[in-house]
Amino acid sequence: MDREIVVLPDPGVVAREAADRWVTLARESIAARGRFTAALSGGSTPRALFSLLASEAYTDKVEWDRLLVFWSDERCVPPDHADSNYRLAHETLLSKVSIPAGNVYRVRGEIDSGQAALEYEEAVRREVGTPTLVGSEMPADASVPPFDLILLGMGPDGHTASLFPGTAALREKKRLVAANFVPRLNAHRITFTPLLINAASHVLFLVAGIDKADVLRAVLEGEFEPDVFPAQLVKPAQGQLTWLVDRAAGAHIEQERGHH
Ligand code: 6PG
């Protein structure tokens, strides 16, 4: 795993750096494989990135009809609900670019969470799965589809996607997508599991705000305690892990020099 941590002046610059990387990764993936498979994160941080990608400055830099869009997690609510991660992305980005509706894979948060997780895992395997390599050596992780990019955020409690401290999905070793009950929220969530996240070619964390500074230091520089700090589970084996953080969130970390 190659890890880089980039501390940038403010959330706006973080969004711009993320947009530039999105454009570069999309171009590389489409050139190499004819498509770009991306999983979006939820919450509030990605809003600035989505708006930027839909803006004049960026929208023409991406071949939107070559994208397959998924979510790295979703709340168990209908698509028009204020808490829906789908709704955030649809309103700020997907409704403004020429991505075919059939290329947008929404988690059905409105149905039973177990069923939603099962059908979403099937969609990931079907659409992102690597075609079986007949005759040649199968890659070690052939059974886990490799997203070109998975966007992630991190909560002040160190959760990422909907992998919350002390919850069952942290220990999921077989499933790619899990329905995860979160006692603190008294709610179910649908989430990518560490297995799927760590098969990605690129994982990009976007973290901003002073309320993340303490937990970011614990995650990046503290003891390995994934049950307490689930973001520590993100270690893409063959992939690139990038943290884009603003100065406020990065206040307590030693800025790394270059790549690890
Ligand atoms: C979600 C997100 C979640 C988010 C963090 C950070 O569904 O809530 O996927 O993992 O990334 O909670 O959220 P903010 O960006 O709002 O701080």
Image: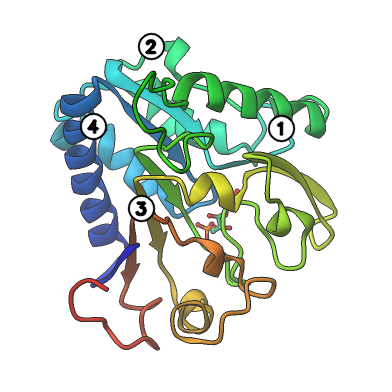
Which amino acid lies under the numbered mark 1 shown in the image of this protein? Ala
> Spatial distance from mark 3 to mark 1, Cα to Cα?
25 Å
> Which element type, helix, strand or loop, lies under badge 3?
loop
> Which element type, helix, strand or loop, lies under badge 1?
helix
Res 117 label:
1
Res 29 label:
4
The residue pinned by badge 2 equals 100
Q: Nearer the viewer, residue 64 or 38?
A: 38
Asked if disc 2 and disc 1 are in contact, CB closer than 8 Å, the reply is no
Q: Position of residue 69 (x, y in %)?
A: 43, 28
Does 9 sit left or right of 101 as displayed?
Answer: left
Dividing the picture into quarters, in which one does residue 136 lie? top left
Quarter in which the N terminus is drawn: bottom left
> Which element type, helix, strand or loop, lies under badge 2?
loop
- First in residue order: circle 2 vs circle 1: 2
- First in residue order: circle 3 vs circle 2: 2
> Spatial distance from mark 4 to mark 1, Cα to Cα?
27 Å
Q: Nearer the viewer, mark 3 or mark 4?
A: 3
The residue pinned by badge 3 equals 238
> Spatial distance from mark 2 to mark 1, Cα to Cα?
23 Å
> Spatial distance from mark 3 to mark 2, Cα to Cα?
30 Å
Which amino acid lies under the numbered mark 4 shown in the image of this protein? Ser
Q: Quadrant of ligand 1?
A: bottom right
Q: Residues within 10 Å of mark 4 (few under 14, many from 20)?
A: some
Q: Residue at x 27, y 83 (%)?
A: 255
Colouring scheme applied when the structure was drawn: rainbow
